[in-house]
Image (cartoon, rainbow, N blue to C red):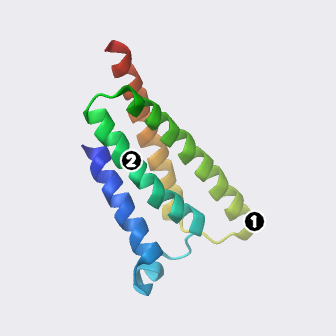
Amino acid sequence: MFAFIFGLMTVFSGESVLFGPAEAREWAGSYIQFVVWFNFLEGFAYVLAAIGLWQVKRWAANLTTLITAATAAAALGFTVVVLRSGAYEMRTVGALGFRFAFWTEIAVLAHRTMRKI
């Protein structure tokens, strides 16, 4: 359930920065465009994974692994951009770390559950 809500919140927050008023972009600060796009699009994958997990579908466990790997790749890309330009928000570091840890745990639990079925 938390993954579903987290997914909806991710889509909404990304949408507000990408398509919302200038105030949303100002509030976001020194954001890195591809990270916002990544999070926005990945939010839909979060929702899909949550629905699949709720229905105990094996593909959902694989999707959680893909989400985890994609988050790691985005974090690596973020690191490269930061090292080249230097402009970023510290909360992005925390958010990417949280997302990676959260989905790693979900993936581990999902695969353990699917093995028992």
Quadrant housing residue 108:
top left
Please tell me which residue lies in front, 94 or 44. Answer: 44
Q: Is residue 87 above or below residue 104?
A: below
Q: Is residue 9 above or below residue 30?
A: above
Q: Nearer the viewer, mark 2 or mark 1?
A: 2
**Tag 1: residue type?**
Arg
Please tell me which residue lies in front, 74 or 29. Answer: 74
Name the spot of residue 84 as percent of width and height, x first. Answer: 75, 65
Name the spot of residue 23 as percent of width and height, x first. Answer: 41, 85
Task: Determine which of the numbered discs, if any, sits on residue 73 in the image.
Answer: none
Name the residue carrying label 1: 84
Q: Quadrant of the N terminus?
A: top left
Q: Quadrant of the C terminus?
A: top left
Task: For residue 106, say whether it is visible.
Answer: yes
Lower position in the chain sequence, tag 2 or tag 1: 2
Q: Is residue 62 left or right of residue 31?
A: left
**Tag 2: residue type?**
Tyr
Residue at 44% over, 86% down = 22
Name the spot of residue 51 as percent of width and height, x first. Answer: 29, 41
Does dot 2 land on a helix, a strand or a loop? helix
Name the residue carrying label 2: 46
Distance in Å between CA atoms under marks 2 and 1: 30 Å
Q: Is residue 46 above or below residue 90?
A: above
Does dot 1 land on a helix, a strand or a loop? helix
Task: For residue 32, say whether it is visible.
Answer: no
Residue at 44% over, 48% down = 98
Residue at 65% over, 50% down = 76
Residue at 32% over, 45% down = 3
